[in-house]
Image (tube, rainbow, N blue to C red):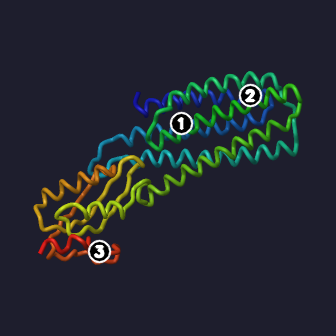
Amino acid sequence: MKSDKKILIAFVLNLAFSIFEFIGGILTGSVAIISDSIHDIGDAASIGISYFLEKKSKRQPDEKYTYGYARYSVIGSTITTVILITGSLMVIYNAVLRIINPTQINYNGMIIFAIVGVLVNLGAAFFTMDGDSLNQKAVNLHMLEDVLGWIVVLIGAVVMRFTDFALIDPIMSIGVAIFILISAVKNLKEVVDLFLEKTPHGIDISEIKEHICEIDGIIDVHHIHIWSMDGQTNYATMHIVTNEDAHTVKHRVKEELAEHGIKHTTLELENETEHCSEKECHIVEHSTSCGHHHHHHH
């Protein structure tokens, strides 16, 4: 099944469930359930946003978006993550209020709700499991959190049922919220790195430069830029100085870059006598030329 289809199913399940859950939280008087439902409604909303953006992100490049629409998926991830962070802070706030003024909880109702919660969310998590886009990872993270949150609520409800220690309820919701906060912040960092065009994870520019310098016929390489649209596809551009047949050299370089997981490359080829028109050419790079190859070509 396509990832946007999966996200739609997750959305419908989640929305229906969070409304059901909100009512349940009010009926049982459990802050853990109410705060969970607020977080779930936030989830559902962000999954809805993700759905439309994920669908849009699959569109082919056109004249308006020459790089394609992949970043829309990343925006989906951003919104989802921000909603999660806000939700978690609200949950923590409500739980602290509840610790100050404890109230009565219907434990049996809470246990029943928690069992339903675990089952429904397991189903949803199972659906969204094998996503590889950052966006789908964010959605799946939501699902897994929900399962975890419900398992915690279930255990807590059972313990409270037998000990009547009502503080467990707000303490649990704080625990879940902190867990969500940590993972959301990590997710946000990944997204910000993408928007800042940071060199993708696991790519070492100086190593790539070295490997390209070792290719026969290449005198120098500079202006290396490597970035990613969506955390999956990497793009690279660079200038290559060579006196040999451009076609052969280009082929060799593209093969080398493909080994580093870079499929989309734009290469500018210059010969040795040409002066690189762009001034920062020699400032950016530590060494002007590949050094050891320079002498073989005279």
Give whichever of 68, 178 is nearer the camera: 178
The quadrant of the picture occupied by the C terminus is bottom left
Mark 3 and mark 1: Cα distance apart in space: 44 Å
Residue beneath disc 1:
140
Q: Quadrant for residue 169, please give it.
A: top right
Measuring 61% from the left and 40% from the top, which residue is drawn there?
A: 42
Identify which amino acid the numbered label 2 is placed on.
Leu
Q: Residue at x 39, y 46 (%)?
A: 232
Res. 131 visible in picture: yes
Taking 263 as reference, is 116 left or right?
right
The local secondary structure at tag 1 comes to helix
The residue located at (83%, 26%) in the rendering is 106
Q: Nearer the viewer, residue 152 or 54?
A: 152
Residue 142: quadrant of the picture: top right
Badge 2 density bin: few <14, some 14–19, many ≥20, Cα 10 Å: many
Image vertical order of residue 143 relative to residue 192, above or below: above
Label 1 amino acid?
Asn
Say which mark, if any, is on residue 281: 3
Q: Horizontal and vertical percent for residue 214?
A: 25, 62
Mark 3: amino acid:
Cys
Q: Quadrant of the N terminus?
A: top left
Say whether residue 65 is visible: no
Could you tell me which secondary element the residue under label 3 belongs to? helix
Q: Which residue is mark 2?
A: 154
Crowd rating for badge 1 (residues with CA inside 10 Å; few <14, some 14–19, many 20+): many
